[in-house]
Image (cartoon, rainbow, N blue to C red):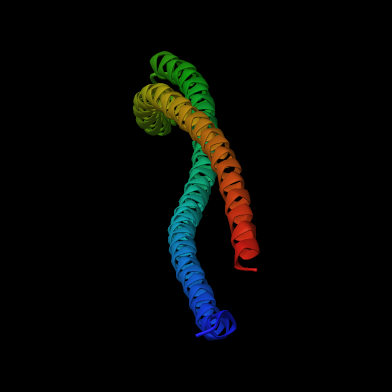
Amino acid sequence: MTTVGILENALPATRLLEKCRLMFQVQEALENQKVEFAKKEEELKEREENLRLKDRELQDSLIGFSKFLQENNAKKVRAEKKALDEARIRQEKEIEIRELENKLEELQKERATAKTTLERMMAYQKYLELVVDVTQEYHEINDLLLRHSTLTSTCDDLAKHIEECSDTLETLRVDLVAYRKASKDEILNLENDVSSAKQMHEKKKRETAGIEQRMDSILQAAASRTLARGQLMH
């Protein structure tokens, strides 16, 4: 066979080998791209899973924060109600003290009036006794004796009334002193409770502000991750 014939037979075989080599390279490149694509897809899935976990954590944090705000608001409402109730109780105690003081003053006046009346009756009784002693033959002696008996009974009643007023006055005075002391202690305790409630309210406000600041940071970070995720998907 001549050289020209050999070359003519060799060229188709060479071209076939070249095509096979190119096909192999293309196939190898496709396989590499598949592997790379699978790797990137796995990375994207992992990122998506991480984002889902972060989103779930963020939702849990938001739920917890919402519950905290609700509880804090409920505590604030209870503290304010307690402060109002304590202020009302304090006002009622002060009114009761003033009423007791007025009653005590009235009893003191009544006692003084009864004492003055008794002294006047006693003087009149002594005068009648003197009249009876001097006018032994006086025709109206029975009237004087009857008047004497009436005045004596009246004086006894007044003396008994003064004694009762004195006992009542002393009892009321002791009760008022004890009530004032108890009310003073109770008012002091109420003021301490109000002060503690105000301090607790301020503390909760500071805690709430700190949590809100942290939640803002978490939300900003989540927004940035969501934006980055969207860019990756495009």
- Please give left or right for residue 230 compared with residue 147 in the image: right
Report x, y in % for residue 1.
50, 85
Q: Nearer the viewer, residue 51 or 183?
A: 51
The answer to whether residue 62 is above or below residue 122 is below
Q: Is residue 85 visible?
A: yes
The answer to whether residue 194 is above or below residue 5 is above
- Count the marks: how many? 0
Q: Residue at x 49, y 67 (%)?
A: 37
Name which quarter of the figure residue 7 lies in: bottom right
The answer to whether residue 26 is above or below residue 232 is below
Q: Nearer the viewer, residue 66 or 168?
A: 66
Report x, y in % for residue 29.
51, 68
Q: Residue at x 48, y 63 (%)?
A: 36
Report x, y in % for residue 164.
35, 28
Report x, y in % for residue 56.
44, 60
Q: Is residue 103 visible?
A: no
The answer to whether residue 143 is above or below residue 29 is above
Q: Residue at x 49, y 47 (%)?
A: 72
- Please give left or right for residue 162 compared with residue 233 in the image: left
Which quarter of the figure is the C terminus placed in? Answer: bottom right
Q: Nearer the viewer, residue 99 or 191?
A: 191
Q: Nearer the viewer, residue 67 or 109?
A: 67
